[in-house]
Amino acid sequence: MPLHDPAPLPADTPLPATEEPLSGSAERRLRVLDPGKVRGVLLHFHAGGLTMGAPAMADASNSLLARTCGIATASLDYRLAPQHPHPRAVDDGEAAALWLLRHAPARFGTDRLLIGGDSAGAWLAAQTLLRLRERHGVADRFRAAYFAVGCFDMSMTPSQRASTAAMFLSPERLKGTRTAAFPGLDGELLRDPSISPLYAPLGGLPPAIFSVGTDDAVLDDSLFMAARWQAAGNVAELQVYPEATHLFMSLPTPMAAEAWRRVAAFFDRHLV
């Protein structure tokens, strides 16, 4: 399926969605958008600071990727803090990834898998890949990853520490995520690789594209993570957008459209 340039979001009416339970988990479901002829499947994790949000909030961008790349998207309704603190969301990501590894060929007609997420969802995508590598040795079964405006250091990078109340990711929002998802932990404890993937060994992971804006509190997270991803021997592509704020890719702007075009082109290259 040829790749074409997307229009600014929302490009089209979102694709119809189906809700599909994970085997062995009646409560955890995947929100699936299927464009018809499928070249691959994207396991997606939504934004929301690990405390809010739902898969449906990404229907527009997931529909755009589905139509542009010819992929099905499967967005997970992972458990949220504070009711379900860490590592429950990562447990859910691991379960969803293993489900796709087993069932994607029968369900979607392909074993070509992708993974990605936005903001907290980018964190969860990274942690899921680390789980797959460390516990199952199958991280390389995912052909590519995208990380949009991800937070990869819960102990706070310099750009997070420079956040102001005027920013979307204000100091209060950043603290709220840490307090809810990682109760009782602070300082060096938050640098544990199971919490902050920036500090994990990153070898043996799939090609990844990192997207972030210069006016985002988590700018340094992407700068540092992309550099370490590449230094570990993986393919990393870093895209930095001038004056773009957090979650800028969800806005109906030409810059957001260009950011998604680059993600789609990256996926397209790695689906061959």
Image (spheres, helix red, strand yellow):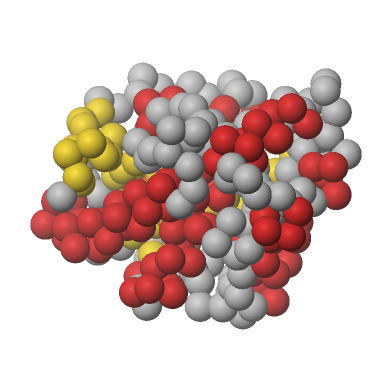
Residue 16 in percent (x, y) is at 25, 25
Residue with the most extreme left position: 106
Q: How many marks?
A: 0
Residue drawn at x 52%, y 24% as measured from the top left? 9
| Residue 161 seen in the current view | yes
Residue drawn at x 38%, y 31% as measured from the top left? 55
Q: Nearer the viewer, residue 252 or 231?
A: 231
Residue drawn at x 76%, y 37% as measured from the top left? 216
Residue with the most extreme front position: 184
Query: Which quadrant would residue 129 be assigned to in this image?
Result: bottom left
Q: Nearer the viewer, residue 232 or 171?
A: 171
| Residue 261 seen in the current view | no
Residue 270 in percent (x, y) is at 44, 64
Residue 252 in percent (x, y) is at 59, 21
Residue drawn at x 57%, y 28% as measured from the top left? 250
The C terminus is located in which quarter?
Answer: bottom left
Query: Left of 220 or right of it: where is 49?
Result: left
Residue 202 in percent (x, y) is at 59, 73
Query: Left of 101 or right of it: where is 240?
Result: right
Q: Nearer the viewer, residue 72 or 39?
A: 72
